[in-house]
Image (cartoon, helix red, strand yellow):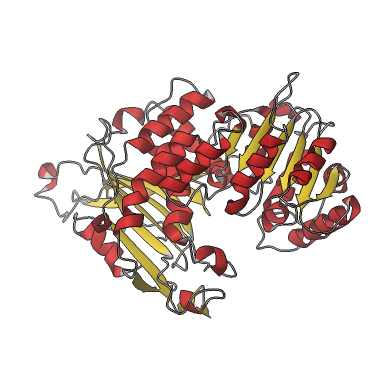
Amino acid sequence: MAEQTIALKDDAASGTKPAPPCTLVIFGAGGDLTKRLLMPSLYNLAGAGLLSEGFSILGVDHSDGTDESLRENLTQTMEAFSKDPTSEFHADHIDPKSWGFIRDRLHYLKGDFEKPETFAAVKAKVSGSAVFYCAVAARFFGTIVDGLGQAGLLKQENGDFRRVVIEKPFGSDLASARELNVRILKQADESQFYRIDHFLGKETVQSIMAFRFANGLLEPVWRREYIDSIQITAAETVGVEERGGFYEPTGALRDMVPNHMFQLLCMVAMEPPNSFDAEAVRSEKAKLAQAVKPIPPEDAVRGQYTAGTSEGHDVPGYRDEPHVAKDSVTETYIALKLNIENWRWAGVPFYVRTGKRMTGRRTEIAVLFKPAPFKMFEDTPNADLGPTVMRIMIDPDHGVGTQFNVKVPGPEMKIGRVSAGFRYKDFFADQPNVGYETLLYDCMIGDATLFQRADNIEAGWAAVDPLLKGWPQADVKPYSAGSTGPKEADDLLARDGRHWLGLDGKTD
């Protein structure tokens, strides 16, 4: 096994200091996001010693409740998660010390997000530094920021900070995203807003920058002269489950592309920043997103899953899911061909696909290098030389795999395909993580590197806006649950003489 030389950021010995004292105010304290992701993340941060003794939590929601009822409710939820192997919280028991640290700091406030009295009550309970987390439906984002601003809760005085975390979806198209940006920036400075995308909390996503820029072997060939195409995939085996009410007006394009998929695109394609300063990194991301040509309808395929078999079980079609219209034309799958207009990537197609109820669960970036000249092998028993493929595996596998050509042992010059690579679990200790730990910590210390700026958000929407306005609503292609998606998505690449890589990690 290769020698491990990288220090892990998992305890006090790593040199990571606790975040400064602050109050985390969670609007939507009774919601699924708070229970399923925020509380486990805070628990993990407490266990790692990364929360200050001066840390506290104020949960705000519309239901009746008390400090003690909130504590009991969240304790029961955490215990249930520890017994559920399908939850994001991977722990077989709750550490009393870590959870006790969080539990004792939980406080509750009943309030209506649309009433000034709620924000006056928050102001009476919050002093010093604070992070306001909008764990609510998107329709409340602007309302909550207005209430915070009008109550004076966003004023930064005496060295204290006031920051606002806004979840996705940030707008539903370019016009609404611009409108929301204008609205919130009337209440506070851009530097106070942390537009969160939990994809960026994944260690393997963050490591893309290190993989690209810390290895001199890669940078010289990371450009159009050497790369044929890039495929970005986020495939899920699950359906919409009970989220039909949210998914119906949203669909795969709005839900995944301008945020998650574009963040992966920016990571793999942006220019090297001159430092890892937050603004330097975010500026390069914004430049890349702004260089994406608006996507014409002919470069997009929309699909919707029908009944089929997924992971050995019969599953219903999308239209038979709860809270879904029987004649729905909402897409559960989207495939796109993207073109980037800049010097590095001119002429290199980026193919993006994401869908539900697919044959495999896989999030990855596959870089396909241009094939070597075939002439010297034309008189040997080789029908073709496959491309060198580098796969950056994000989920569920974590690591990097490369597939390339070598000589098969024997008297003839026969070429065969081999694979090489690494998985993080073979080199690094496993750390408790549901994906929000780094994001919450970074927000508290004021590091905005992994958060989206207004121009980045708007650039993502600008690229997909022609699709939202231009494609026929009924033009959604069926695909069976448990398949790789609609045939038309295969045709999208076939017209360029290419094909999608398999969802099983193989090249062919």
Residue situated in front as seen by the camera: 475 or 350: 475
Q: Please give left or right for residue 70 compared with residue 428 in the image.
A: right
Q: Eyeballing the image, is 423 above or below 123?
A: below
Q: Eyeballing the image, is 253 above or below 184?
A: below
Percent x, y of residue 89: 70, 54
Q: Is residue 392 at least partly visible in the picture?
A: no
* Residue at position x 53%, y 54% in the image: 396
Percent x, y of residue 208: 47, 37
* Residue at position x 66%, y 33% in the image: 163
Q: Is residue 260 at least partly visible in the picture?
A: yes
Q: For the N terminus, which image quadrant?
A: top right
Q: Eyeballing the image, is 375 above or below 448?
A: below
Q: Residue furthest right?
A: 68
Q: Please give left or right for residue 60 compared with residue 232 in the image.
A: right
* Residue at position x 16%, y 56% in the image: 383
Residue situated in front as seen by the camera: 406 or 12: 12
Count of marks overlaid on the render? 0
Percent x, y of residue 331: 41, 65
Q: For the C terminus, which image quadrant?
A: bottom left
Percent x, y of residue 462: 36, 44
